[in-house]
Structures are given as structure tokens and as C-alpha cells.
Image (tube, rainbow, N blue to C red):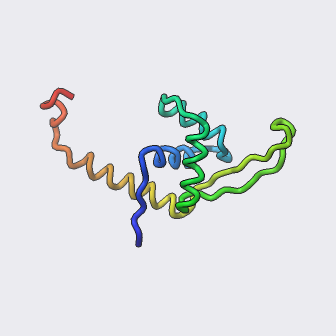
Amino acid sequence: MRRAFLGEFEEIVLLVVAACPAEAYGVTIWEDLQQQTGRSITMSAVHATLYRLEEKGFLSSTMGGATAERGGRRKRFFTLTALGIRALNDVQEVRSRLWQAIPPGKFQLIGG
């Protein structure tokens, strides 16, 4: 089985999509990303990442219906795929192993 590699921003975007209580689409993902990370992020960076994650098979998307509030434009909703869930689980497992490998008191020794 091929191992999935994610960049840090890709991982955060996947986590935001996973944590979204309602249907996730560009604006809600962008707002949650900024709120959760405290970063100023452009909408185009979010869209580029969403489409890249979809190309990699970590996300799938569907088009919603047109709404009057958006001037008749449709929203694209993103959901995690099984591959995306596995990628997040892999990342979490690696990070947990690394954190557990840090000897107790290590951060106090180096002033952290």
C-alpha cells in the first residue's frame, strides 16, 4: 500500500474539512482555517489546496444547488475520502510516535 504524504498546510486543510460540522465549502473552510491557525490565508491558496487534495484522492467534491444569496452561483462541497482519512490517521500516528520518543524533561534541559 502506498503511503500518503501531506504537506503541513494540506494536513491542516484536511483536518478543517474533517472537523466541519456541516457541509464544507470554500468560504467556511477558509474562515475556519484562519480562525484555527491565526494565520492570514488567501482564498486562492485554500482553493488551490482543496483541488490538489482532490487530485491526490484525499477529498471528493460535489456541486450544490444554486442559491439566490450567492447570485445563482453554486457551492462546491468537499468531503474526506477513505484515502484522506487514512492519510490523516498516518500523520497522527507518526506525530504521536515522535512526541512519545522525546525523553521526559528534555524541554526543560534546553529551556523550552
Q: Work out whether residue 95 or residue 73 is closer to the camera in this orientation and state it.
A: 73
Q: Residue at x 49, y 30 (%)?
A: 39
Question: Furthest residue to the left?
Answer: 109
Q: Work out whether residue 63 or residue 86 is closer to the camera in this orientation and state it.
A: 63
Image check: 1 left or right of 31? left
- Residue 87: horizontal and vertical position, in percent? 45, 58
Q: Residue at x 57, y 36 (%)?
A: 32
- Residue 65: horizontal and vertical position, in percent? 82, 50
* Residue 59, above or below 25: below
Q: Work out whether residue 22 or residue 53 is closer to the camera in this orientation and state it.
A: 53
Image check: 50 left or right of 87? right
Q: How many marks?
A: 0
Q: Residue at x 69, y 50 (%)?
A: 77
- Residue 70: horizontal and vertical position, in percent? 81, 38
Q: Quadrant of the N terminus?
A: bottom left
Q: Quadrant of the C terminus?
A: top left
- Residue 107 figure quarter: top left
* Residue 2, above or below 64: below
- Residue 106: horizontal and vertical position, in percent? 16, 37
Question: Furthest residue to the bottom?
Answer: 1
Q: Residue at x 84, y 46 (%)?
A: 66
Image check: 23 left or right of 49? right
